[in-house]
Image (spheres, grey):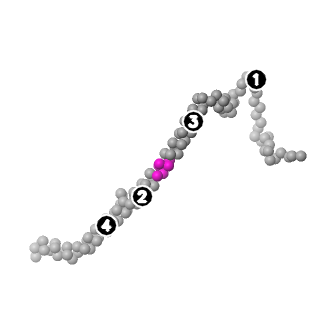
Amino acid sequence: MPVREKIQLLLRHYGRGLLGLLVLVMIVHDIFGTHGFLAMRRTQIEITKVKAGLNQLAKENAVLEQEVKDLKSDPQLIERIARDELGLVRSGEMIIRIPQGQIQEPSSVVKR
């Protein structure tokens, strides 16, 4: 029996099973492979998270830009920061600091 006839006989006998196995392997690869459906879904979720992070950073950047504009143009804001954070005072002014333990809460004051 020539080789060609042996191959044809094998293909007739096992051809459908091999074809089905090949299709099954292709489907599994398309779902679970490195570039398959599940990997693409994970990538899309990661892209969504990164875009959300970028939007949040853009909002924070806009707030910081507004703060910079305010600090450059608003002398009252500059004075308030100098007083609150740096403890600066004008000449003739005095700062009186009350320790935190001695400050009474409004709800603890007794009304008569």
Taking 46 as reference, is 88 left or right?
right
Cβ–Cβ under 8 Å for marks 3 and 1: no
The residue that disc 3 covers is 66
Q: What type is the residue that disc 1 sits on?
A: Gly
Q: Which label's residue is closer to the chain start, 4 or 1?
A: 4
- N-term-proximal mark, 3 vs 1: 3
The one nearer the camera, 101 or 65, is 65
* Residue 91, quarter of picture: top right
Which mark is first along the chain, 4 or 3? 4
Q: Answer with the quarter of the image where residue 16 lies.
A: bottom left
Label 1 Cα neighbours within 10 Å, binned few <14 / some 14-19 / many ≥20: few
Majority secondary structure of magenta residues: helix
Which residue range is magenta in the image? 48-53
State how far apart marks 2 and 3 are (Cα).
38 Å
Q: Which residue is most to the left?
A: 2
Q: Amino acid at mark 3?
A: Gln
Q: Earlier in the sequence, mark 2 or mark 3?
A: 2
- Work out whether residue 86 can be spotted: no
For residue 25, the mark is: 4
| Residue at numbered disc 1 | 92
Of badges 4 and 2, the one in the foreground is: 2
Q: Which mark is residue 41?
A: 2
Helix, strand or loop at label 4? It is helix
Q: Is residue 35 visible?
A: yes
C-alpha separation, residue under disc 4 versus residue under disc 1: 87 Å
